[in-house]
């Protein structure tokens, strides 16, 4: 999985490209943790994500919990492919995570 980062003020956008598998999660978690230290808001561009594993979902949820614990900021997902949307719907995560169209 490739991760490209762009910034705008207190917001960072991470464009994820490939499969969000258990193998890719450590790199994603490292990027998310670094983003949490520097930025208030994290946007995840999911338009090129082909697959999301349960480990990938856990990494995203963990980051959301850390943001909520800080008391400010937000984590949003956008550009979900049909496959990614279905995975989040089946797991019920579409009701827990903020998903923008």
Image (cartoon, rainbow, N blue to C red):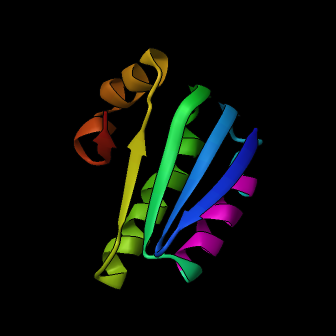
> Between 101 and 75, which is closer to the camera in this rendering?
101
Quadrant containing the C terminus is top left
Which residue occupies 31% across, 41% down?
Answer: 99
Q: Quadrant of residue 69?
A: bottom left
Q: Residue at image x 58%, y 64%?
A: 7
Furthest residue in direction left, as rendered: 95
Front residue of 56 and 37:
37
Q: Farthest residue in the front direction?
A: 8
Q: Is residue 19 above or below residue 43?
A: above
Q: Quadrant of the N terminus?
A: top right
Asked if 30 appears above or below 53 in the picture, the reply is: below
| Residue shown at the point (46%, 54%) measured from the top left | 43
Using residue 64 as the reference point, say whether residue 98 is left or right of it: left
Q: Position of residue 18 (x, y in %)?
A: 70, 30
Q: How many marks?
A: 0
Please state if 95 lies on the left or on the right of 59 as rendered.
left
Q: Is residue 43 magenta?
A: no
Considering the whole magenta stretch, tell me its main secondary structure.
helix
- Residue appearing at x 47%, y 64% in the figure: 63
Furthest residue toward top: 82
Q: Is residue 96 above or below residue 54?
A: below
Q: Position of residue 19 (x, y in %)?
A: 68, 30
Residue 32 falls inside the magenta stretch: yes
| Residue 86, quarter of the rendered image | top left
The residue nearer to you, when weighing 30 against 100, is 100
Q: Position of residue 61 (x, y in %)?
A: 43, 55
Quadrant of the rendered structure where residue 94 is?
A: top left
Magenta-highlighted residues? 27-36
């Amino acid at each position: 999985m490739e991760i490209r980062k762009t910034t705008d003020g207190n917001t960072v956008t991470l464009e994820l490209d490939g499969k969000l598998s258990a193998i890719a999660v450590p790199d994603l978690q490292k990027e998310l943790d670094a983003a949490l230290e520097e930025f208030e808001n994290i946007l995840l561009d999911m338009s090129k994500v082909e697959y999301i594993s349960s480990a990938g979902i856990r990494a995203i949820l963990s980051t959301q919990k850390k943001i909520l614990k800080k008391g400010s900021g937000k984590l949003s997902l956008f550009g979900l492919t049909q496959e990614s949307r279905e995975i989040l719907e089946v797991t019920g995560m579409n009701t827990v995570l903020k998903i923008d169209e």
